[in-house]
Amino acid sequence: AKHNKKEDAWIVVNGEAIDVTKWISIHPGGEQAIMAYLGKDATEEWNMIHKPGTVEKNAQHLTMKGKIGAGGGAAPAAAAGGGGLSPDEVAKHNKKEDAWIILNGDALDVTKWIPIHPGGEQAIMAYLGKDATEEWVMIHKPGTVEKNMQHLKNMGKVSGAAASAAPAGGAVDDSPPPPDGDGGIPGIIGACLYLLWNVVLMLLRTIFFTGNFKLDNNRNGTMRSAIFLLTFTIVHALGNFVDMLGGPDELNGEGYLFDRIHWTGALGMAKDFPFSVVEEYLALGLLLHVTVALKRSYDITIGYTIATGRWNMLLSGLVVLTFLTKHLQDFRFYPEWDYVEIGAPPLLINFGGVLQGHVFTDPNGPTVKARDLYTREVALFKDLNTVLGYSLALALFVTHLCLGWKKLVPADAMQIPRDHQQKVIYIGWLAAAAIAFMYGSVPWYVYFAKPAVVKNIVVPLPK
């Protein structure tokens, strides 16, 4: 126990005292994984994560100091004698700067892990000084403690605490933990590159496989669908902003873009199908996000009070869902459209006219019939109460987005290197502010601006 400093470092493994001083700086698992056990028995942890022969393979960096006591596997130092720690002793360590929890019968010092916990600080703070086993196994996959040992410290067995608990079924996520450091690309450039790369990977996984064919609380269901929905939100907000700058024809032209791809719905096998493949994926993504989020809330959040903050995502999400239902009724499922004529680009986007302000229309293109979204927008947003309601809902949506993004970025599935995570969180919040500005400017602009004159056409009723 005297050899517990980096420059004089011993550990006990399977009854042998080993001098690991030279190995600390080159240990593949990082310095902290060894430093947590200096002067202690590391047998249990060592055998859990190292395969046989690891000591022999690294003998040039280690010095064997001899057997401890009578040899054989020594008991963990913290649990030796007296039956281990008492729950009352653990209960004293209930502050952020001195934080212990009980997990599967062991006392863990989680002080260093609190600021970087993927689920947020409050998820741990609620259990400081207490037994967190039941909650832990419900939302973490087996091996989470071992994967994060550089941030944790096993303080020993707790007398009277449950030795283990069965993992909750269906909540498995086999992603490795995010890499330490900056991944070899430092600074804001590295943060942006890792963000873009992992967003693309998440989108591909969402499109081709989510893992939630059965209803469970697998966090991947909410994370992958969130990335998909967020990507569409950014594109949609930008489109709305461009429409506002471009005038009535651009807004009606964007509506026509979605109408003209309805043939892609139902795998292209149903003539005059009312939804495109984009809308189908959005509906499925939203359904996945909502159902898995509700399942996780029921499994994990239901036992907490609102004051803990654990309900923030659920409550803000339900408000956003309610608003989204109204918004779809206001526009997508509005039954009494007027129609106009616009010039349609040969492709979905008029790439040659972007600089002239013709993104969704082409003055030289063929004349087509399109829904008059502009007149409908004016009818809605000339009412101050509607504008205020939309603005309030937008504020809650952005709050939900920011809360979720902060939880998403450190998640194993995102694979953002730890040194970049805070920068990526800030990038996401900046994007959320841009979304708020683009969405929020439209109703207020329509409310204050003089309406443009739009010429409607008569559309024969279907026979």
Image (cartoon, rainbow, N blue to C red):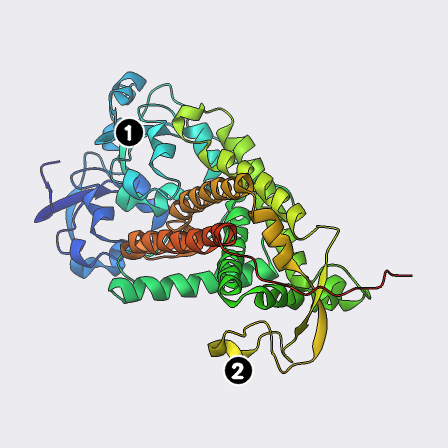
Q: Which disc is residue 269 wearing?
A: none
In this rendering, position of residue 38 left or right of residue 229:
left
What residue sits right under mark 1 in the picture? 100
Q: Amino acid at mark 1?
A: Trp
Quarter holding the N terminus is top left
SS for callout 2: helix
The image position of residue 176, as x and y in percent, is 41, 54
Could you say which quadrant of the image residue 146 lies in?
top left
The image position of residue 101, as x and y in percent, is 32, 28
The image position of residue 84, as x and y in percent, is 28, 23
Q: Residues within 10 Å of mark 2 (few under 14, many from 20)?
A: few
Could you say which quadrant of the image residue 60 lies in?
bottom left
Eye-nearest disc, 2 or 1: 2
**Residue 318 versus residue 442: which sits nearer the camera?**
442
Q: Is residue 184 above or below residue 289?
A: below
Could you say which quadrant of the image residue 453 lies in?
bottom right
SS for callout 1: strand
Residue at the (24%, 53%) spot, across then down: 30
The tag earlier along the polypeptide, 2 or 1, is 1
**Residue 270 versus residue 96: which sits nearer the camera?**
270
**Residue 105 versus residue 238: which sits nearer the camera?**
238
Residue at the (72%, 67%) spot, across then down: 264
In this rendering, position of residue 111 left or right of residue 445:
left
Q: Residues within 10 Å of mark 1 (few under 14, many from 20)?
A: many
Q: Which disc is residue 352 wearing?
A: 2
Residue at the (52%, 79%) spot, across then down: 353
In this rendering, position of residue 246 left or right of residue 151:
right
Q: Is residue 371 above or below residue 134?
A: below
Quarter holding the C terminus is bottom right
Q: Amino acid at mark 2?
A: Gly
Residue at the (56%, 43%) spot, across then down: 383
**Residue 159 versus residue 366: which sits nearer the camera?**
366
